[in-house]
Image (cartoon, rainbow, N blue to C red):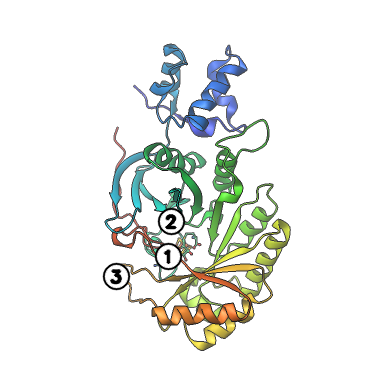
């Protein structure tokens, strides 16, 4: 038997719904509403669960559509905290990673860190994903499936979603924007999972087009900018593929975003010993940030196998935070989670390429 051709999650999006209608032309609107409910409300990951749909229609679905868009390869639990890392196989047979991180709040939820690409084309020096190279974009169904599958598997609610896994989301804009429609809902005609856009953050290394497009988007997604240095030359050393995008351009894009959305932009700054933690870096950082509406997160560098970099001392990180705060800039340190299982920021890499089973 031939394997099913169409991605079911994507097919629910208004842009692709015709391909679903084509198989069920005699069905009424209510039928399609029931299908949506199985995924978006009941978070079903298998057509066999669609018990109010006739056996015949479930067969048609299973013959022509796949659900979910990824399959689970393995799961690793941290021995240190509540972080869980999932290895998932894509339609092309590559593997990607998604991570559930304890949100640290009393009512115990998870933050889902999801991937937008298979690997990354931008090879930032400090990042494990960057060493993989670019193996392809994830489809919108594959992006959303990370949420659907982990929501169905986990015993705690997913309270927030961050696009901080593998890949540069703004180099896969078409699929990332479609995925946002499915996660948050597009308009009254399509409510998708109905997640509040305020609970979703996209992290970018500074792709200007993406920042502009997100600023013009109807959803109020949170924007996170991976800065890591406010000195052009040193940023270019750390992120060589981004050397043509200047800090001035980045500052303008961030300003545009916060004005359009009336919200602060989050700034991520990895503290790398002797590379971006000098007094000159601190001075440049303060000058860069002062005119902007931002909240800064300092991250102690997470060790990546085979890379020579070291995190700055805790004392130095605390000093940077103090100095920023003294200038009225909101600054905190991101608590490190999942580093024992290679699930912390920048540690996501999958070496294993799994071939698709026939
Ligand atoms: N490509 C996007 C999103 C994925 S990376 C981006 O770069 O923003 C998610 C975050 O992890 C980024 O802020 C990135 O700079 C950071 N990161 C990468 N490698 C890291 C490491 N080894 N230690 C700590 N943070 C890292
Ligand atoms: Fe890609 Fe982000 Fe890693 Fe840079 S930090 S290589 S942009 S995933």
Residue at image coords 63%, 62% = 208
Q: Quadrant of the N terminus?
A: top left
Residue at image coords 26%, 56% = 79
Residue at the extreme right of the image, as rendered: 259
Say whether marks 1 and 2 touch (CB < 8 Å): yes
Q: Position of residue 163 (x, y in %)?
A: 50, 53
Q: How many numbered marks appear?
A: 3
Using the numbered discs, state the Cα–Cα distance from disc 3 to disc 1 in whole angstroms: 23 Å
Judged from the image, the secondary structure of the residue bearing numbered disc 2 is loop
The residue labelled by disc 1 is 335
The residue labelled by disc 3 is 306
Of marks 2 and 3, which one's residue comes earlier in the chain? 2
Judged from the image, the secondary structure of the residue bearing numbered disc 1 is loop
For this rendering, which residue is in front, 241 or 217?
217
Q: Quadrant of the C terminus?
A: top left
Quadrant housing residue 272: bottom left
Q: Is residue 33 above or below residue 354?
A: above
The residue labelled by disc 2 is 104
Q: Position of residue 205 (x, y in %)?
A: 53, 64
Q: Residues within 10 Å of mark 1 (few under 14, many from 20)?
A: few
Residue at image coords 62%, 18% = 29
Q: Residues within 10 Å of mark 2 (few under 14, many from 20)?
A: few
From this viewpoint, is residue 114 visible? no
């Amino acid at each position: 038997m031939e394997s099913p051709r169409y991605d079911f999650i994507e097919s629910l999006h208004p842009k692709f719904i015709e391909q679903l209608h084509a198989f069920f032309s005699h069905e009424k609107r209510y039928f399609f509403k029931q299908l949506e409910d199985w995924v978006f409300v009941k978070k079903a990951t298998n057509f066999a669960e669609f018990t109010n749909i006739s056996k015949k229609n479930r067969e048609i679905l299973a013959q022509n559509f796949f659900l979910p868009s990824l399959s689970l390869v393995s799961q690793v639990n941290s021995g240190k905290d509540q972080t869980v890392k999932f290895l998932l196989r894509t339609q092309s047979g590559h593997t990607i990673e998604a991570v559930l991180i304890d949100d640290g709040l009393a009512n115990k939820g998870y933050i889902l860190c999801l991937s937008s690409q298979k690997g990354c084309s931008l090879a930032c020096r400090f990042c494990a994903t960057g060493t993989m190279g670019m193996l392809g974009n994830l489809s919108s169904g594959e992006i959303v499936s990370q949420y659907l599958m982990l929501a169905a598997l986990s015993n705690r609610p997913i309270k927030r979603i961050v696009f901080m896994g593998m890949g540069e989301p703004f180099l896969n804009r078409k699929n990332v924007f479609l995925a946002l429609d499915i996660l948050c809902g597009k308009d009254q005609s399509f409510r998708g999972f109905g997640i509040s856009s305020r609970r979703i953050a996209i992290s970018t290394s500074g792709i200007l087009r993406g920042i502009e497009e997100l600023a013009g988007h109807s959803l109020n997604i949170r924007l996170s900018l991976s800065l890591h240095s406010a000195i052009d030359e040193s940023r270019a050393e750390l992120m060589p593929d981004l050397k043509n995008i200047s800090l001035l351009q980045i500052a303008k894009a961030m300003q545009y975003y916060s004005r359009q959305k009336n919200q602060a932009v989050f700034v991520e700054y990895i503290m790398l010993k002797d590379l971006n933690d000098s007094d000159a870096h601190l001075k440049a950082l303060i000058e860069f940030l002062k005119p902007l509406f931002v909240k800064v997160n300092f991250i102690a560098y997470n060790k990546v196998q085979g890379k020579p970099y070291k995190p700055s001392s805790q004392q130095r990180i605390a000093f940077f935070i103090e100095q920023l705060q003294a200038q009225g800039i909101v600054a905190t340190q991101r608590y490190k989670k999942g580093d024992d299982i290679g699930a912390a920021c920048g540690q996501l890499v999958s070496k294993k390429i799994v071939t698709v089973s026939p």
